[in-house]
């Protein structure tokens, strides 16, 4: 349950009714809670650290999880000492959400460091421990921006080996002190159990922390939830989450490998409305554990736009929830899609309406890398799912939308792709960049094959060598993320591809182009 409280003001009758309803909900669960004792061990605990997300100029989500039915209390300030409190908010942590709770903080000052502290109170109102977190609201002026992106965590059985430093890429990203982090998907690998040990090519042994819920392929809601709780055992991830807000999207492994809405199910089958029960359980766990805003237009919607001041809009798209069946596509190419009609129309409208200098399209899959599950299928004109991408790219050109950059992960190596109509079979679009990074903490693969439909050229790529072989363990150093810096004066975007050791592997400066939209009266193009 999420409750938005605007600043520190008197409670209205509506707030009192909401709070009273929450109190009754908690009181009704009294039989589930342990009798309260004064010992610290019997106080409500924060079990998985803190998270913030979807930060804008004046609001942000805050997330935490308790170990029992409780109420989450949040106080926030622009001062780390909390000697001045901007406001306070509360929300319930109940069994039906696995004791997770999130609150939308509103009325925040723009361009400010916000410090927040969280505690849980049990049904008697006596508080447990307090933890503190931090995020920075988006600016309303042209100050510089820095953020990081990547994806793919705890894949291929490579879990948390504490003796090797755990999930070290999160620690490295924290050292960069970004304004926010885009997680491009595969937060978990629900279809990849974590064994106690894995043999390494050099003869050594990788030793995982293991849990019951992460020891089998996820089917039950408890197992999907357990995948997120497993990752949050890592101290690097918890430290990162407490300091850097996340813009979350998902890909396939939050459900199962290469999933699509039709054709991805287990023995429980489908609900009466035709939806997969497996996908529903996976989606429920994802939304419970992500610090995301809840869509008012569509329950469970992942795609959204996050505005981060005059220099940047981030468009987080969803290439899973609305796609055609991965394995049952028609040979004539009809009825095949990756975004779906509603999301594609939304993306066009939002891009056309954006006043930001840079429009970052955060995708969960690359455009031009050949894969049966993805978009590109090989050289030639746009076919099947490529037709939606061609439609989008043509619209961007026709509508005069400038300065679009695509960011993604998924491929388990890092690369910079430049798309140019002069190299392409399909040429009705403006040149643009796409950057690939990851994995954060999973097996590393060798670079893939590009097709010529949209004219991509690999300006840089790094992954496993043929000698190393695919699925190289994280301890060999080929774990990647990307950093984006936008200069407030020149508006130049600098994209740097980095590794777990914080080494700069490759970098490019991209000059912004002037807006070509005549009066922004673009409805006729949509």
Image: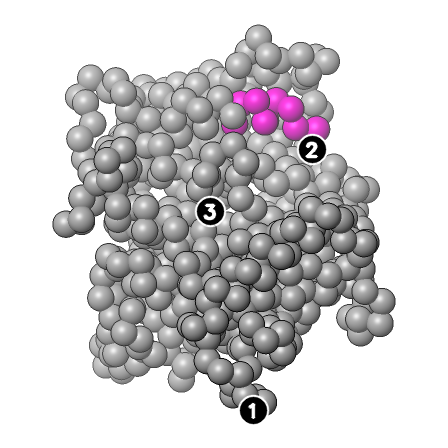
Span of residues in magenta: 347-356
- Residue 106 lies, with reference to residue 87, above or below; the image says above
Foreground of the two, 160 or 38: 38
Point out residue 274 in the picture as x, y percentages from the top left corner: 24, 34
- The residue pinned by badge 2 equals 356
CA gap between label 1 and label 2 equals: 53 Å
Point out residue 50 in the picture as x, y percentages from the top left corner: 57, 67
Residue under the point 52% across and 66% down? 27
CA gap between label 2 and label 3 equals: 21 Å
Q: Is residue 342 visible?
A: yes
Q: Is residue 145 visible?
A: no
User: Outermost residue, top direction?
Assistant: 524
CA gap between label 1 and label 3 equals: 40 Å
- The residue pinned by badge 3 equals 249
For marks 1 and 3 on the same chain, the one whose residue lies earlier in the sequence = 1
For marks 1 and 2 on the same chain, the one whose residue lies earlier in the sequence = 1
Residue under the point 72% across and 65% down? 75
């Amino acid at each position: 349950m999420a409750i938005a409280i605007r600043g520190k003001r008197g409670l209205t009758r509506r707030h009192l009714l909401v709070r009273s309803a929450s109190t009754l909900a908690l009181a009704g669960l009294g039989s589930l809670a342990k009798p309260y004792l004064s010992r610290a061990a019997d106080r409500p605990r924060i079990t998985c650290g803190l998270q913030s997300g979807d930060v804008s100029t004046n609001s942000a989500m805050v997330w935490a999880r308790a170990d029992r039915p409780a109420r989450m209390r949040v106080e926030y300030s622009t001062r780390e000492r909390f000697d001045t409190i901007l406001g306070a908010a509360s929300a319930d942590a109940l069994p039906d959400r696995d004791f997770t709770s999130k609150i939308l903080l509103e009325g925040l000052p723009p361009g400010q460091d916000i410090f927040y502290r969280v505690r849980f109170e049990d049904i008697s109102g006596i508080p447990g421990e307090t933890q503190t977190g931090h995020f920075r609201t988006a600016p309303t002026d042209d100050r510089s921006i820095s953020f990081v992106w990547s994806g793919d965590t705890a894949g291929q059985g490579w879990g948390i080996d504490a003796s090797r430093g755990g999930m070290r890429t999160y620690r490295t990203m924290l050292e960069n002190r970004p304004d926010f982090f885009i997680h491009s998907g595969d937060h978990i690998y629900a279809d990849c159990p974590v064994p106690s040990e894995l043999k390494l090519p050099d003869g050594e042994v990788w030793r995982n922390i293991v849990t019951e819920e992460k020891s089998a392929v996820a089917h039950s809601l408890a197992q999907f939830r357990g995948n997120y709780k497993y990752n949050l055992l890592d101290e690097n991830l918890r430290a990162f989450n407490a300091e850097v807000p996340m813009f979350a999207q998902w890909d396939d492994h939050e459900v199962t490998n290469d999933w699509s809405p039709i054709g991805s199910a287990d023995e429980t089958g489908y609900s009466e409305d035709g939806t997969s029960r497996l996908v529903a359980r996976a989606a429920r766990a994802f939304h419970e554990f992500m610090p995301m805003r809840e869509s008012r237009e569509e329950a469970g919607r992942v795609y959204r736009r996050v505005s981060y001041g005059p220099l940047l809009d981030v468009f987080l798209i969803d290439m899973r929830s609305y796609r055609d069946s991965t394995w049952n596509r028609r040979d004539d190419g009809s009825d095949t899609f990756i975004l779906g009609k509603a999301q594609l129309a939304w993306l066009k409208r939002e891009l056309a309406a954006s006043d930001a200098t840079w429009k970052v399209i955060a995708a969960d899959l690359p455009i031009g890398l050949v894969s049966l599950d993805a978009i590109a299928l090989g050289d030639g004109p746009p076919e099947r799912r490529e037709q939606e991408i061609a439609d989008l790219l043509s619209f961007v050109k026709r509508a005069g939308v400038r300065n679009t950059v695509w960011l993604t992960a998924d491929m388990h190596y890092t690369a910079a792709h430049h798309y140019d109509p002069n190299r392409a079979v399909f040429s009705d679009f403006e040149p643009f960049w796409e950057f690939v990074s990851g994995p954060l903490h999973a097996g590393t693969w060798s670079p893939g094959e590009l097709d010529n439909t949209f004219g991509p050229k690999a300006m840089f790529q790094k992954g496993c060598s043929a000698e190393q072989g695919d699925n190289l363990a994280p301890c060999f150093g080929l774990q990647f993320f990307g950093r984006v810096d936008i200069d407030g004066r020149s508006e130049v975007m600098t994209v740097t591809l980095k590794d777990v050791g914080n080494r700069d592997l490759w970098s490019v400066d991209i000059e912004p182009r002037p807006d070509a939209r005549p009066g922004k009266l673009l409805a006729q193009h949509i």
